[in-house]
Image (spheres, grey):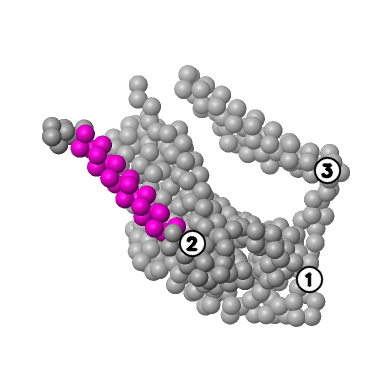
Amino acid sequence: MDWLYDPRLRGIASQIVVLLLIAWGLYEIVANTQANLVKLNQNFGFDFLGKAAGFDLSTSLVFYSSNSTYGRALQVGFYNTALVALIGIFFTTILGFIIGVMRLSKNWVVSRFATLYIEIVRNIPVLLQIFIWYALVLKPLPGPKQAVNIANSVFISNRGIIMPQPFFGDGTLLAIILFVAALIGTWVFRRWARKRQEATGQAVPAWLISLPIIILAPILGLMLAGWPVTWSFPELAGFNFKGGMTLVPEFIALLLALVIYTAAFIAENVRSGILAVSHGQSEAAHALGLDGGKTLRLVVIPQAMRVIIPPMASQYLNLTKNSSLAVAIGYPDLMYTTGTVNNQSGKAIEAYSIALIVYLTTSLVTSSFMNWFNARMKLVER
């Protein structure tokens, strides 16, 4: 009985017991599920993914029709979710940083506006904000015949924002190659500029040099290829528009609500990160002749990032998962298409298992990237 008094053996034994309980619980779940499937005269399998879906989706980044398969419908839902998440993360990061810096402004009006924004927005449920944007802002817009006309190219109505759609020909590959080459060249140039500044103290305006190159490189590629780009402009035909591309109200409402809501939390992360930097750092920067803007950009923000990034990663995950609320207004994201596939096929376990795996994988990839980025941004001790 000496093992009862050995902490190491007790720890191993307790872990074995916990693992056995978990295994027993999983076995009971599987057995119960199989028994229920037998009672319902159903079998578990993913063969249904190859069958015709029989329903349409309002928004799709790839070709889709009612004759497409269930697998294609889930693919469209994932693409729509990814689109909202990527665009939302981009804009919510910018807005969150702006509001966070405004919160610390010495200007009373600016700081109080930022405070009011944060306290109001983050205390209103995001689902309610989605409904407000959708039902109270976008749906009351005029119909297609009375749409807001911007230069006869962009129309804003209760059908969404209709704008010109580009079509790229075969020569587009050259523009893509030059664009990728410009990105790689910019990365190499910025590394060289940073090392030069660390060695000599002389700063190189890397972005002022790199940004024009990134913009002009694909344009040069298109020009060399004979400009293989054509445009489809929207035109009013009867009671709707034809041609162009449409940003449906559901997408706009979802994106606006997620961006504005998540930015309020990121703003607080930014504020706490800036406050975590010693005030002596700012005083030292001012003593070297740096103004307030350069002090914030070159001294404070780089040090604050080590505090900002971890909670900001959580907000990125929240934004991605909150996009599943799109089902409330009919935007065909992954949860919307999963529910429709379940209703049409009766394969609830299989359909929602796919959605679970997709969301889990997306979250793990996002977390892994943010952990890598956090490791890159942490302070290097001498």
Is residue 219 in view from this perspective?
A: yes
Q: Is residue 302 above or below residue 70?
A: above
Q: Nearer the viewer, mark 3 or mark 2?
A: 2
Q: Which residue is mark 1?
A: 242
Using the image as rendered, state which of residue 239 and residue 74 is in the foreground: 74
Residue 171 is labelled as 3
Q: Earlier in the sequence, mark 1 or mark 3?
A: 3
User: Residue 375 at x, y = what percent?
Assistant: 42, 34
Dot 2 falls on a residue whose secondary structure is helix
Specify whether 62 is left or right of 362. right
User: Residue 82 at x, y = what percent?
Assistant: 58, 54
Residues packed near mark 1 inside 10 Å, few (<14), some (14 to 19) or many (20 plus): some
Using the image as rendered, state which of residue 23 and residue 311 is in the foreground: 23
Q: Residue at x 52, y 58 (%)?
A: 353
Tell me the quadrant of the picture where the N terminus can be found: top left
Q: Which residue is mark 2?
A: 34
Specify whether 208 is left or right of 280. right
Residue 10 inside the magenta-drawn segment: yes
Specify whether 7 is left or right of 212. left
Q: Is residue 214 above or below residue 98?
A: above
- Number of marks in the image? 3
Tell me the amino acid under the disc marked 3: Gly
Q: Which residues are magenta?
A: 9-30
Q: CA distance from mark 2 to mark 1?
A: 50 Å
Q: Residue at x 41, y 50 (%)?
A: 314
Residue 4 inside the magenta-drawn segment: no
Q: Nearer the viewer, mark 2 or mark 1?
A: 2
Specify whether 72 is left or right of 304. right
Q: Main secondary structure of the magenta part?
A: helix
Q: CA distance from mark 1 to mark 3?
A: 27 Å
